[in-house]
Image (spheres, rainbow, N blue to C red):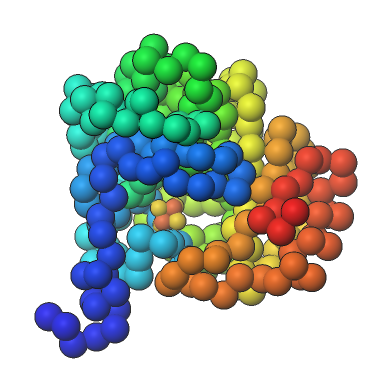
Amino acid sequence: MKNSGIILIMEEREVREIVYGPVHSWRYGKSLGINLLGKVKRICTFSCIYCELGPFSIKEQKELYAINRSVFVPTDLIIDEFKKFMDKDFDVITFSGAGEPTLAKNIKEVCEKIKNFKPDKKIILLTNASLFYLDDARKDILNFDIIDAKIDATNEEFFKKINKPIESIKIENILTGIKELKKEFKGKFHIQIMLTHVNLNQVEKIANFVKKIKPDEVHLNTPTREPWKKPLGTQVLLPLKKYFDDLKVRTPYD
Ligand code: SF4
């Protein structure tokens, strides 16, 4: 069916491999990607307006949502794939891929095994923080070196507008979950805020929450890739650092 632009884009977009890259990250350098969700279009608790895995039709978005934690790819298969890449030139290993990595119940096991193979490389988790309110999900990620959690809004109205979460996920759960994780996690904790013209007027409110959390770094990001290639310019993004007082704030324009 090639009767709309949306479907055309989707068909041309390749699904993520289980291990991919290394790709260049403005925050972390050469990053080898680990995708615990398998060769799927997306499995996520959100459907963010700027998601580079999308866009999808409304019907498809519903099918791509998930809330239940599960094993999507067996650990041994992931490790076998990882071994094929482990001698490549990369700086860090990043769990990201085709959706929300904390949905994968074997995240802890995979992280531990990869650490044994590459103890000298930092292992990073990119997450939307939507499952932090679950005790088992938080326990499963405590052995990462860096957790980089997304927060694009602090109230329900903007949360729904920009992240389009699954019905049962509320912004209050996320804010509480982030506070809990910050108490328990001993590694470096980073917050990423994806700013678009939709949530630009929420920066001060987000900053007020973030300042209480005291992360090691704040990343003010803006979408530079399709399908939402409408990044905020340097002159808009850089002055927003002032809202975060003395926290370490980085942007792609630094
Ligand atoms: S949280 Fe990430 S993977 Fe999920 S919809 Fe948003 S951008 Fe896409």
Q: In which image quadrant can residue 104 be found?
A: top left
- Residue 16 horizontal side relative to residue 132, left or right: left
Q: In which image quadrant can residue 80 be found?
A: top left
Residue 108 vertical placement versus 234 (above, below): above
Quadrant where the N terminus sits is bottom left
- Residue in view at x 63 percent, y 32 percent: 189
- What percent of the width, then of the height, locates residue 23? 45, 46
- Residue 240 horizontal side relative to residue 146, left or right: right
Residue 208 vertical placement versus 53 (above, below): above
- Residue 21 horizontal side relative to residue 130, left or right: left
- Name, please, the residue furthest toward the left: 1
- Residue in view at x 23 percent, y 77 percent: 7
Foreground of the two, 200 or 76: 76
**Is any part of residue 230 visible from this angle?**
yes
Q: In which image quadrant can residue 184 be found?
A: top right
Query: Quarter containing ligand 1?
Result: bottom left
- What percent of the width, then of the height, locates residue 142? 50, 21
- What percent of the width, then of the height, locates residue 141? 46, 25
Q: How many numbered marks have been drawn onto this rendered protein structure? A: 0
Foreground of the two, 12 or 163: 12
Foreground of the two, 236 or 161: 236
- Residue in view at x 61 percent, y 44 percent: 27
**Is any part of residue 176 visible from this angle?**
no
- Residue in view at x 18 percent, y 28 percent: 77
Quadrant where the C terminus sits is bottom right
